Amino acid sequence: MGLFSGVAGLFNMEAGKKKLIREEINLAEAVEAHIGWKLRLQKYMDGHSEEKLDPMAVCRDDQCALGKWIHGPALRHFHEDGTFHQLRTDHAQFHLIAGNVVRHVQAHERTAAQALLDKEYQHTSHKVVYALTELNRHVSG
């Protein structure tokens, strides 16, 4: 059994529900956006970014397309699915760590920012991307 295979699991999900989820969110784009954050943060840390990142905005997990879906429509589909709630927790942690990377950069604490990016960020990002990839695989079929 893989991710999202519990009571409200996707292996038994009807085609109509899968279609509805695909209409609500493009999970492949969400994966790409979250993968892209590492490059954005690295460029910001290296001083090569033209973005003005606000750590208080970056740490909000309900502002990106995925976060809006997780906090909104996805709850209807997966409110009883423990794996979904783990994705929700991991996604929130992802944004919190990214916000802390930005905060460290702004405080000129590059070593701390790089350590966060290399360890906790990388680990949490991998968990989010893996869960999204699995979810996308199941709703695409």
Image (cartoon, rainbow, N blue to C red):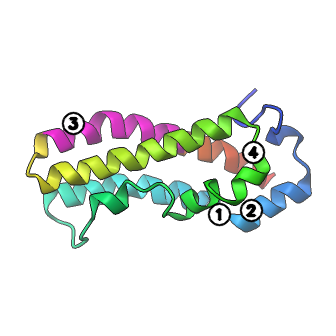
What is the span of residues highlighted in magenta in the rendered image? 112-128
**Relative side of 124 to 97, left or right:** right
| Labelled pair 1, 2 in contact (Cβ < 8 Å) | yes
**Considering the numbered disc 2 on the image, is that residue within a helix, a strand or a loop?**
helix
Check whether the beta carbons of the residues at disc 3 and disc 1 lie within 8 A of each other. Answer: no
Q: Which residue is mark 4?
A: 78
Query: 53 or 5: which is nearer to us?
Result: 53
Where does residue 84 sit, x and y in percent of width and height? Answer: 66, 40
Identify which residue is drawn at 47% across, 46% down: 92
Left-right relation of 85 to 140: left
53, above or below 84, in the image: below
Q: Quote the CA–CA distance across marks 4 and 1.
A: 17 Å
Residue ID for mark 3: 115
Please tell me in which quadrant of the rendered image residue 26 appears: bottom right
Q: Position of residue 98 (x, y in %)?
A: 33, 50
**Dot 2 surroundings within 10 Å: few (below 14), some, or many (20 or more)?**
some
Residue type at mark 2 is: Arg
Few, some or many C-alpha atoms within 10 Å of disc 4 (few <14, some 14-19, many ≥20)?
A: some
Whole-angstrom CA distance, mark 3 to mark 2, is 36 Å
Q: Is residue 67 positioned above or below 123 on the image?
A: below
- Say if mark 4 contacts mark 3, CB within 8 Å: no
What residue do we see at 40% from left, 58% from top? 36
User: Which residue position holds label 2?
Assistant: 22
The answer to whether residue 122 is magenta is yes
Whole-angstrom CA distance, mark 1 to mark 2, is: 6 Å
Q: Which residue is mark 1?
A: 26
Q: Residue 46: x, y in percent? A: 15, 57
| SS type, badge 4 | helix
Please name the amino acid that badge 4 sits on: Phe
Sequence-earlier tag: 3 or 1: 1
